[in-house]
Amino acid sequence: MKKSWIIALNTFNESLRKKTFYILLVVALVVIGASRFFSFLAAEDELKMIKDVSFSTIEFFGALIAIFTALAAVSGEIEKRTIYTLLSKPITRNNFIIGKLIGQSLIILLNVLLMSIFFIVLLFIKKSPPDVQEFKTIFLLFVELILVGSITLAVATFATDAFNLIFSFFLYIVGHLTSYGQQLLERTENFIVKRLGGLLYTTIPNYENFNIKDKVVVGVDVSWKYVGQTTLYGIIYITIAVLIGIYFFHKREV
Amino acid sequence: MALIETKELSKVYILGNKKTVTALNRVTMNVEEGEIFGILGPNGSGKTTCLKLLLGIIFPTEGEISIMGKTQYSIAAKQNIGFLPENPYYYDYLTGPEILRFYGRLFDMTRSAIDERSENLLKLVNLDDARNLSLKHYSKGMLERIGLAVSLINDPKILILDEPTTGLDPIGCKETRDLLIRLNESGKTILLSSHFLSEVERVCSRIVIFHKGNLLTTGTLGKLLEEYRAENLEDLFVKAIEKFDKETGASEHGVE
């Protein structure tokens, strides 16, 4: 674990030096900041708008950072050939994948923290301090982003960057639409489509589970039980993704 | 005592269209404790493939590897190895001392041990003055030298060096050669891959010649010069390759 942590810190420090991180972060902050200019709305609607835009921005730009960081984590090491030296040292391939996951999760954490601080400051400016529901929303978004990153990391161990990029975004979109897909499946009569759809529904992570912003924005409370269950759901998927990554990386020749 | 042994080691790459390339073909060799063992061969002869196999970076198609009696994947074996890849690349945002600290920590070295060793190594490879410079500002020669320092951070018993003088000027080459001899005298076993014949001739106690993935011959330089009736290493190298090509019909070996 100590060696994974050393690799994680290096991944974190290296990612911090990438321009992509700062560009995405600045754009995200601008978008969050821009939400406060909806002053023509009624005070209550304006607050809803700020929350909605901020949560969506944290999620979307967080996903971009998660995907790009995970892409660089494996293929960056291979392209720059830094992996030769690393794998010749007394580390296991498990250390490498787990280290990369922790490192990219730290980057995601930093990104979510910075955007959240900006969002909270905005709420204070509007004289509406955040309550625990807002923090629950941000926490579940954070778990979702780690899951998005871990899937990209797993795919990076066996696929090309181009495929991984398309796959990760496709999965991100489909993962948000699985509930709609389930509704459509209930209406279809075709056996094959029903079976295939059912298989996809149970395999693909349902990212909408992590999305409680629609409820929180309109003032509906989300229970701690739901937060706990959804976190566990995320951890199970993250574990599966990491195990897949480890399995393929053990077979990967660099 | 052999610190590194390979038995019938082969590596075949599958290219698609049912084509394969035999990068290494049934290589059996050993590196004895305390020697400087040179792997010679033209570009594409299988030298780097052999080193990557020894380090567990790629996997053999057939055959066995033993490093200090353990497999190439063993953490205990890697604990005793220092490796310098060809044209080394490192995390270029780090400075010399930082990169040494990073790799040193992977060997479970204490901070004080790393700092002490780093000081000595930076002086040894003449990078003491560049200690505050990040690696992205390093020249090719400086990268080669910090690579050598990285390979020595754990004070390894075995040093595996892939083309260690590539990119170095003549003075740098000489300094590296002298350093390798000094390290060998201090008890390190060195496995050196190179296509610079003069470099190998000057430092290696035993050599092996690879060509198109095949081990052509191995032994001490004196013995091989006699066996091939060659005047020098260059002559020996050419004769060994010509003999192999003649015997095998000089076809596109390896591609099936």
Image (cartoon, rainbow, N blue to C red):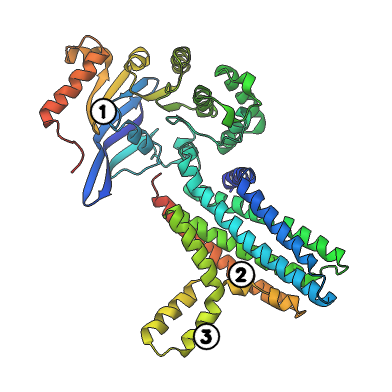
> Residue B111 at x, y = what percent?
66, 32
Give the chain of mark 1. B
Say above or below: A9 vs B7: below
Residue that mark 3 sits on:
A183
Q: Residue at x 46, y 36 (%)?
A: B78
Which residue does the image show at 56% across and 49% down from the upper left?
Answer: A99
The picture places residue A63, in percent across and down from the top left corner, at 60, 61
Circle nearer the viewer, 3 or 2: 3
- Residue at image mark 2: A232
Quarter of the figure with the C terminus of chain B: top left
Q: Position of residue B224 (x, y in %)?
A: 22, 16
Image quarter of the N terminus of chain B: top left
Residue A112 in view, yes or no: no
At label 1, which amino acid type do we have? Phe
Point out the tag, 3 or 2, that comes first from the N-terminus. 3
List the single residue furthest toward the right.
Answer: A127
Chain letter of disc 2 in the image? A
Mark 1 → mark 2, Cα distance in angstroms? 55 Å
Amino acid bearing label 2:
Leu
Residue placed farthest to the front in the image? Answer: A40
Q: Is residue B140 left or right of residue A55?
A: left
Which residue type carries mark 3?
Answer: Gln
Q: Secondary structure at mark 2?
A: helix
Q: Check disc 1 and report the residue beneath it.
A: B210
Q: Nearer the viewer, residue B167 or A96?
A: B167
Answer whether labels 1 and 2 touch (C-beta < 8 Å).
no
From what the image shows, is residue B250 above or below residue A215? above
Count neighbours of disc 3 (C-alpha within 10 A) and say few if under 14, some if 14 to 19, many if 20 or more. Answer: few
Disc 3 and disc 1: Cα gap in Å? 64 Å
